Image: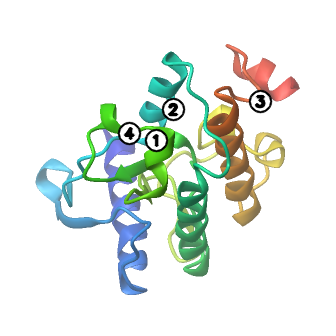
Amino acid sequence: SEEERAQYEQEKAIQRILKENGNYKHLLLANEFIDEKRVIITDFMRGSDLGELLRRFKEKKVMLNPYQAQGLVAGSCKGLQRMHDCKIIHCDVKDSNMFLDTNLDLDDITPERLKAGITLKFSDYEISRHESIPRRYGSGSLDGTPYYLAPEVILGKIPDQRSDVYALGIMYYKMFTGELPFNSGRFIDICRQ
């Protein structure tokens, strides 16, 4: 569809800006784009996304504490800072858009093992914003995941760096409690919370 093509082009443009400003270990960036099929090729990631790890921890009734997760927290802050230094607003910061770069199988990751040898990498830049890139799609709509949207974005304001930081805070809340702070089945109910 036209929207999918526009999102693909947006992702390419954002990644090009990030690469021009130096590759960074907390960002998952493409090695190659295959335009005919809209395919993005990255380095092989043995790990999974942070959302899947948190789901598994919750199923096992395992909770993280800040000490155990300090490497993930520091890495996510560094990755977000790198994007903001490049004047990029991610617009969809959440656990399922953060990949664990590790040599461990997902089943072998415990809270105690999080501190050593696991890097968290941002991914999914298709709705990210940069001042030099015109919006190609989604005019008038909310971009992002409702549970992670800052209140001002829900009210129709343009996302900025603070919106990403707010979403990062929601992700940390979920990381340490196993729940989202605002958890309702309907978007309108999330907005009211």
- Single out the residue that lies furthest toward the right: 192
Residue 155 image point, x, y percent: 83, 42
Q: Dividing the image into 4 quarters, which one contains the C terminus?
A: top right
CA distance separating discs 4 and 1: 11 Å
Q: Are discs 1 and 2 less than 8 Å apart at CB?
A: yes
Amino acid beneath label 2: Leu
Q: Quadrant of the N terminus?
A: top left
Tag 4 and tag 1, C-beta contact below 8 Å: no
Please tell me how crowded label 3 is: few (under 14), some (14-19), or many (20+) other residues with Cα within 10 Å: some
Count the labels in the image.
Answer: 4
Which label belongs to residue 109?
4
Q: Which residue is mark 3?
A: 181
Q: Nearer the viewer, mark 4 or mark 1?
A: 4
Can you say whether 143 is above or below 62 in the image? Answer: below
The residue at which mark 2 appears reads as: 54
Which residue is denoted by mark 1 in the rendering?
50
Q: Quadrant of residue 41?
A: bottom left
**Placement of 59 over or under 166, stated as above or below:** above
Q: How is the image coloured?
A: rainbow
